[in-house]
Image: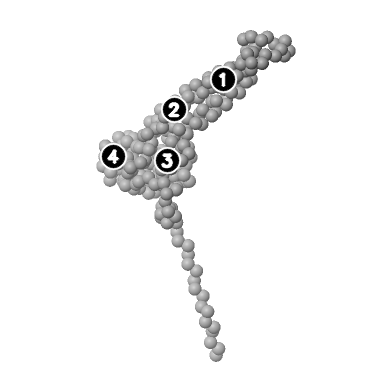
Amino acid sequence: MVDKSILLDNKKFTVGIFDDSDKLLHAVNTLKEKGIKIFDCYTPFPVHHLDHALGYHRTNLTIGAFLCGMLGCLSGFTLAYYMNVVDWPMIIGGKPQDISVFTSFIPVMFELTILFTAFGMVIMFFARSRMIHGIKEDLLSRRQTDDHMVLAIDNDEDQAISNDDILTLLKKEGAIEVNNSKEAFNTSLTSEEELAKLLKKPKAPTKAKTSTKKPKKN
């Protein structure tokens, strides 16, 4: 169920960090034209047409959603039929006590169809994206969850051009930072000092020392 191809464990990447989504999209198209295999892109917000540029196909999540909906619909019918026909039949408004009472079950079946579909899609999405509780996050840049976008190229892949040419091409495409040996890190296992270096926080200005000596009297 979990997509193993998205794992970043024990890998090194050539990374280009962008601050503009249009430049990222243009860089992806340019690299693909050059025959370069892109591992993935990480953005803090959806970038339109990026999935098509990376060559991703339409997700199969809709098939799972349909199956979950059918399961919910069947569960709603089974619940309502068992309660109203088998377990505790009651004559209400002259309704029949057989399968022809199906039409009165439609509201229950509809609600359970929606409920099973919603919960099923959430569970499948989190499992497929490897975002289950307790699994550490893998980041290539601390700011990829804020305002920067990361284009990652696996160094173990055979590329059409050299690594130096890829770095030059990334800079030409508008990357504000490039790195040819970037490793993923986990923020929960990273010290504050290391995080400060990753963020490149400027040091706080030191206050000027004031003299405590009293001025001499003339």
Decide which of tag 4 and tag 1 comes sooner along the chain.
1
Please state, as top left, top right, bottom left or bottom right, where the N terminus lies in the image: top left
- In 3D space, how far apart are the residues under numbered discs 4 and 1 (Cα atoms)? 49 Å
User: What amino acid is labelled 4 in the image?
Assistant: Asp
Q: Which residue is mark 2?
A: 59
Q: Name the spot of residue 42 as percent of width and height, x first.
A: 42, 40
Q: Which residue is mark 1?
A: 75
Measuring 72% from the left and 14% from the top, which residue is drawn there? 92
User: What amino acid is labelled 1 in the image?
Assistant: Ser
Secondary structure at badge 4 equals loop
Q: Which residue is mark 4?
A: 156
- In 3D space, how far apart are the residues under numbered discs 2 and 4 (Cα atoms)? 27 Å
Judging depth in this view, the residue of 191 and 206 nearest the camera is: 191
Residue 103 visible in rendering: no
Residue 114 visible in rendering: yes
Q: Which residue is mark 3?
A: 42
